[in-house]
Amino acid sequence: MDFSFSPEELKIRERAAEVARLVKPHAHAWDEANLLTDELRQVMRDSGLARLMVPAEFGGESERLDPLHIALVREQLMAASSAADALFALQGIGSNAITTVGTPEQKAYWLPRIASMDALAAVALTEPQTGSDLRSITTTMVRDGDDLVVNGAKSFISNAPYADVYATLVKEGDGLSLVLVPKETPGVTFGRTPDLIAPHVIGEVFYDDVRITDADRLGEPGKGLEAALGTLAIFRVSVGAAAIGLAEAALAVAVRHTQERQNKGRPLARIGAVASLLADAKIDLEQARWVTYHAAWKARTDPLGAISTTSLAKVAATEAADRVTDRCVQVMGRFGLLAGSDIERYAREARPMRIYEGANEVLRLTIARDLPGEYLA
Ligand SMILES: Cc1cc2nc3c(=O)[nH]c(=O)nc-3n(C[C@H](O)[C@H](O)[C@H](O)COP(=O)(O)OP(=O)(O)OC[C@H]3O[C@@H](n4cnc5c(N)ncnc54)[C@H](O)[C@@H]3O)c2cc1C
């Protein structure tokens, strides 16, 4: 077994670390603004990192998307700014269905623009009344002559209203289909999602007699859920990577604080109970890190076949990040509670990761479902 990264992987990680250094000083301001700033978009555009989200044939960097490369980037970006991490991640999450099941025309039009960040992508699955249970969505698509007419509402959509194109899950007859809806399509409007505890560029998308055609389908009619799940198979593990980036950044802050702060004439970190909290944080972090890297490596060759492993990594790493940030707040005492501090930001940002891209309880079902096949076959 070789646990070292290749020179190419190290180079990608270093590129991402460089972007992280550029964005970190702005993280609080961007959170505060809670909108997609021109500065962030420019930094991300200049970095070229979005080219990792598109196959080389359409302006990307490698022949196909590499979950480990994406994970390495998200780990670095999330440690610095969740807005930067989200903007990077969404270029892939929003466009992956175009890459995997899009038509040649859709690929040729959208993917080069997404790779260069001239266009921003989004995926619209969730609705005001439906989250985990996607089979119950109520946004409909019906045929009217040559047109397909979409009506409904999508809720908590990352990158809305800034994204230029929305991969939208619709109910078509008894099945679910995925369609590509450009922002400018007549009948598409946007609303505001309530502010979250961890600021995120997010919005509501409304479809009012939106007319598209068969050319806007993403994949076959009735196969929308499969296309959406294919995307999650590649990107779910990258949430785990973002979680370990966040946890490590929090631990670094807590280590510095507990070394500098004195208690009975010696560093706080030397008090047994504090040392123990820090050690537990480190143990959690390293377990999460290696489970995540392994899952990302496994997903490289067969993302759907690795779904149980990537789900496990997402659950393990996001729950580890929650525990790590909580311990870091604890060892910092009142200084861990200061609004606007880095540690406060990390603690808030760890929380949503257990809910999006598959609530952890739903993922546990996937993991448990595969156990008999693994142990009783
Ligand atoms: C920051 C953020 C960004 C998001 N971005 C997007 C986006 O870009 N596009 C998009 O479409 N959506 C997006 N979402 C929505 C996200 O995908 C949903 O929040 C998620 O699918 C969970 O759905 P829900 O919140 O409606 O929770 P519910 O489905 O109401 O579930 C609530 C809780 O019940 C439990 N639960 C539910 N179903 C099951 C089950 N079958 N088995 C076991 N336990 C279960 C879980 O604990 C879950 O947390 C985003 C959400 C957040 C917070």
Image (spheres, helix red, strand yellow):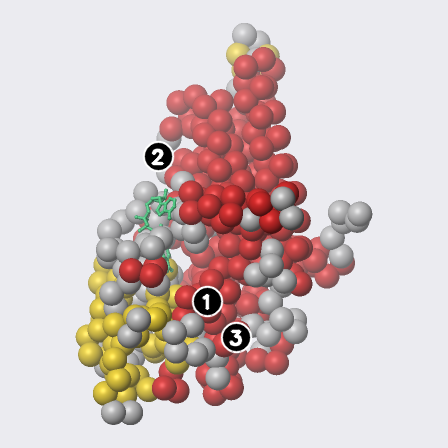
Figure check: 307 above or below 245: below
Q: Quadrant of residue 372?
A: top right
Q: Residues within 10 Å of mark 2 (few under 14, many from 20)?
A: few
**At x 29% / y 79%, what residue is drawn?**
184
Residue hosting label 2: 339
Mark 2 or mark 1, earlier in chain: 1
Q: Amino acid at mark 1?
A: Glu
Tell me which amino acid carries mark 2.
Ala
Residue where numbered disc 3 is placed = 99
Mark 1 / mark 3, whichever is N-terminal: 3
Quick check: 117 left or right of 163? right
The image position of residue 355, as x and y in percent, is: 39, 46
Q: Secondary structure at mark 2?
A: loop
Name the residue located 76 percent from the left edge and 58 percent from the top edge: 7
Q: Would you name the residue on which mark 1 appears?
A: 226
Q: CA distance from mark 3 to mark 2?
A: 41 Å
Tell me if I can see residue 253 in this picture: no
State whether residue 51 appears in this view. Answer: yes
Q: CA distance from mark 1 to mark 3?
A: 14 Å
| Picture layout, residue 9 above or below residue 65 | above
Give me the C-alpha separation between circle 2 and circle 1: 42 Å
Residue 252 percent location from the top left of the image:
57, 34
10 Å neighbourhood of mark 1: few (<14), some, or many (≥20)?
A: some
Q: Residue at x 72, y 61 (%)?
A: 8
Of 6 and 342, which appears nearest the observer? 6
Residue type at the position of mark 3: Thr
Q: Secondary structure at mark 1?
A: helix
